[in-house]
Amino acid sequence: MKRWWLGALMMGSVAWAQLEEVQAGFIYVGPVGDFGWTYSHDRGRRAVDERFDWLTTTFVESVPEGDAETFIDQLVRGGANVIFTTSFGYGEATLAAAQRYPEVLFGHATGFQTAPNVMVYIAEFYQVYYLNGLMAGALTETNKIGYVAAFPIPEVKRHINAFTLGVREVNPEAEVEVRWLYNWFDPAGAAEATQALIAEGADVFAFSEDTPTVIQTAAERGFPSFSHYSAMYDFAPEHVVSGQIANWEVIYADFLEKVHTGEYTAQNLEDVNYWWLLDDGAVIMGADEETPINPVFEERLRAVTVRDPELGEVSVYDLVMARHDAMREGGPEAFDPFTGPVRDRRGNVVIEEGVTPDQETLETLEWAVEGVSASSPWDNEP
Amino acid sequence: MELESWLISATARSLAFATPLLLAALGEIVAERAGVVNLGVEGMMVLGALTGFVAAQLGGDPTLGVLAAGLTGGLAALVHAFLAITLRANQYVSGLALTIFGLGLSGVVGRAWQGQPLRNPFRALDVPPLAELPVLGPALFQGQHLMTYAAILAALLLWVLLFKTRLGLSVRSVGESPAAADALGVGVYGLRYGCVVFGGVMAGVAGSYLSLAYRPSWSEGMSAGMGWIALAIAIFAAWNPLKALWGAFLFGACFHLAFRLQGVLPAEFLRLLPYVATIVALTLASLGRSRARRGAPAALGTPYTRGER
């Protein structure tokens, strides 16, 4: 009799660890309609919600970073057993809530601190930014490329650096001029920053802000640009060259499935760190999902050739596709844009010849590579 | 870069950014001249931006968008007018509610319109003979939108209207001393209604500039605090449409220069510039004794009840 109870209890606890029914709550920093960051997280949420019948999802949007804990409480009270907090600024709140609810599993997007029930995850763009940089370097005529950036934090700096490495590989004369918005979502600021860069002679544009503003503003003056985060091809079919698209669905699906099967529990997330790249399908290079490089620019990209130690004399178009395929098939081991020698813009060698930096180096990077314009302000530059 | 071309491009951009600020500020000036404060400018602007975008997208013509945006702003202001004038509710609370309501409603309704490029936006244009002028041409008459010129024209017309016509005198008297105006046979309620609704129309049109010309698409919250700046400009300009022209230009310049001067001046300082200017303007305006001198309508914010004093 006692055995029977014990068995039932064990069965019960296994079932509990497996989470037969997963209820995932998402905390968003912006509106789901921003067409950028929050929009693409929500796209991922909707996709997994549809895909798994054992999963239900809920979300709260436009949650100020200081208020995250209140909303986590609400979601837990509503029955959520998995919670995703989708902004770097939610880090403290996530860790505090994770202590209060040890049975709930947490995922913190772009975070770096884990706990037994907190994992971190990111769909990382640096490879795609580098590929965009190759194209931008070939397309500029003024040798000045404009970059409208959100916040001077390591993530954004890493992307600007990867982009600039691409630019300089193709065009050692070109410089990347950066303007900071100090905002993730600031259409008016993005428009004015683009106009300021145009006035200073920039003729190709990239950005990290959550709307298609830079593309629209640049296109109005006939300049090419690279879209960010979502498929923005439709906003300027003649002017969007390529871009990066986040595909959070693959990360959410992988994690939630492992929660469902019991592989991940509220006790073993300490070492779970999704740093998913091109080869995981978490990011896509393209003006939209079907257009890796806008055909409008194919001719111009084929007309510029560079000398590559492995590929020999090669057009920028073929170079981009070769590198893209290498990274998508073989991951960062096959090719990594940050492989040394890499110099910062003050001339110091920051990554030695032949060295490929580890994830932590990239996660905490504060310097600017050679080629980022000297007049670009750069907070915390070592 | 040469100083001259630097100044030219900075002027042109300041003008472009000043347009929505000017349109909304002009509307608020008229409403406040009649004695009614409307803190709902931000809400009316964002509603205008959304309805303007939707109407232009469905109708295929940006002019339709402007009309729809003006209508929406006017209707929203009508609600405020009813509360503030007829029900004599607290104008500040009612206006704030309108802003919160506008931001919320446009966010929910606008969801389906996110991420769409506008098919037929207003195109920037050059004004044929004037664009050829040596310095002034590129600074003022190249690559601007028609609405920018309309806004400047509106400032001139409203100045004439307010200070040179009988109607303007009535509007101002209603804002200064509604009881006296009433005694002289001026329709206080009707004029106040008209001015508040006009203010709403202008705020709506200002919003449509954002979604039809400045950045032809819709994003939630795209008015981004401009309504509040417009309120500050009304005070800064001492409720004078011509001075609002300069005020709006100055604020436009603050925004643009924040990006132009990055790397020259500390970014933190530049980012604060428009808001510092707002606070300075508000401080100056609310210094007790200077208030009368700077021309605030005496009955501003006070509901009028016939027969009470």
Image (cartoon, helix red, strand yellow):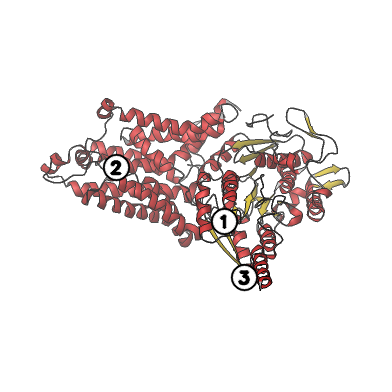
Q: Label 3, secondary structure: give it.
A: loop
Q: Label 1, secondary structure: give it.
A: strand
Task: Using residue A294 as the reference point, say whether residue B205 is left or right of it.
Answer: left
Question: Residue at position x 54%, y 42% from top?
Answer: A191
In front of the other: A36 or A61: A61
Question: Which numbered disc, 3 or 1, marks the residue that appears first in the sequence?
Answer: 1
On the image, numbered disc 2 is attached to which residue?
B37
In front of the other: B45 or A282: A282
Regarding residue A214, the answer to whether it shows in the image is no
Question: CA–CA distance between discs 2 and 3?
Answer: 54 Å
Q: Amino acid at mark 2?
A: Val
Residue at the far front in the pictured view: A1
| Relative image position of residue A198 (x, y in whole percent) | 60, 38
The N terminus of chain A: image quadrant: bottom right
Q: Which numbered circle lies on residue A26?
A: 1
On the image, numbered disc 3 is attached to which residue?
A53
In the figure, B291 relative to B219: above or below? above
- Nearer to us of marks 2 and 1 is 1
Question: CA–CA distance between discs 2 and 1?
Answer: 40 Å
